[in-house]
Image (cartoon, grey):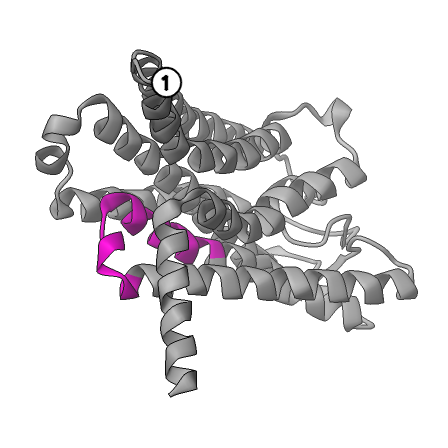
Amino acid sequence: MENQTTVRKFILLGLSSDPHMQIFLFLLFLVIYLVTLVGNVMIMLVIKADSHLHTLMHFFFFHLSFVDICYSSVMVPNMLMNFRAKQKTISVDGCIAQMFFFFLSAGTEVFILSAMAYDRYAAICDPLHYVDAINKEIWVQLVSGAWITGFFYALINTVFALKLHFCGPNQISHFCCELPPLLQLSCTDILTNQMVLLTSVVILGSSSFLFTLISYIHVISTILRIRSAEGRRKAFSTCSSHLIVVSLLYLTAFFQYTKPRSVSSVLLDEMFSVQYSILTPMLNPIIYSLKNKEVKTAVRNILGRFRFLNQC
């Protein structure tokens, strides 16, 4: 890699060059990162501790929380260091590595969300065969498949990125090493990289989105056939949190990676990136906790035990 490049380091321009604004952004994103870590770790511990939450949906939720920790940790710590650093640099190899783990986390999250949609389809549309159709072996296969798919999604884009030649300029108008702004700095032809990126996003993103969409078309049509309003409300409440999370992630990420360059802007790109790579991992445990009655009950029970132990 070093023999093929003139540029050895990139400068990440970040969200702002104003020193006072950088202090504010440092504190803001530090709080967001801490909330992300605490929220997702708490969800994982609650699911592990409460036997009532040892179901497929919460199994997926556990792994989604783990992926969200990885997803956020790929971006935010380096971002926080750059807010306080005089030289906001990252090596070319470090940039490629960050891009790989970003693709890995994002791809895995997308397919875990698709698996969660399938779980809701099986639970609501075919409840009599749900236990037989969704056993623990299938649980592991679905999560493993999500990680494997995410890995190949990251690998194929990273392999082609390793062939890029950078000879200057070396300033990235972004706070992290995502592929689209990186391609703009390449001295070599990027048509192949653009085609690989667009094809992988469309194939993997569209397949997971269509799988989720088809699952929810069946789910919603089944819910609408339920006669009682209370029954419809309960059935829809089990899906609403997942639909919110899917919408937050898919809409921003898909637009970011498929929009034409003519509508691209630094501010727009950074806003979308902050949404799907930093805010979504923080919001996921909050959304699921607020909308999931079993999780809220488990959290209250655990907090009640701590209060009881403190009184003793």
At 37% from the left and 38% from the top, the residue drawn is 111
Kindly indicate the quadrant of the structure image that contains residue 107. Answer: top left
Left-right relation of 275 to 245: right
175 or 276: which is nearer to us?
A: 276
Which x, y percent locates residue 109?
42, 44
* Residue 211 visible from this viewpoint: no
At 91% from the left and 60% from the top, the residue drawn is 18
At 78% from the left and 72% from the top, the residue drawn is 84
Tell me the quadrant of the picture where the C terminus can be found.
bottom left
Other-residue count near label 1 (Cα within 10 Å), few / some / many at <14 / 14–19 / ≥20: some
Q: Residue furthest front?
A: 311
- What segment is highlighted magenta in the picture? 48-68
289 or 155: which is nearer to us?
A: 289
Residue topped by disc 1: 220
187 or 38: which is nearer to us?
A: 38
Task: Report helix, strand or loop for mark 1.
Answer: helix
Which x, y percent locates residue 311?
42, 85
Vertical placement of 256 versus 42: above or below? above
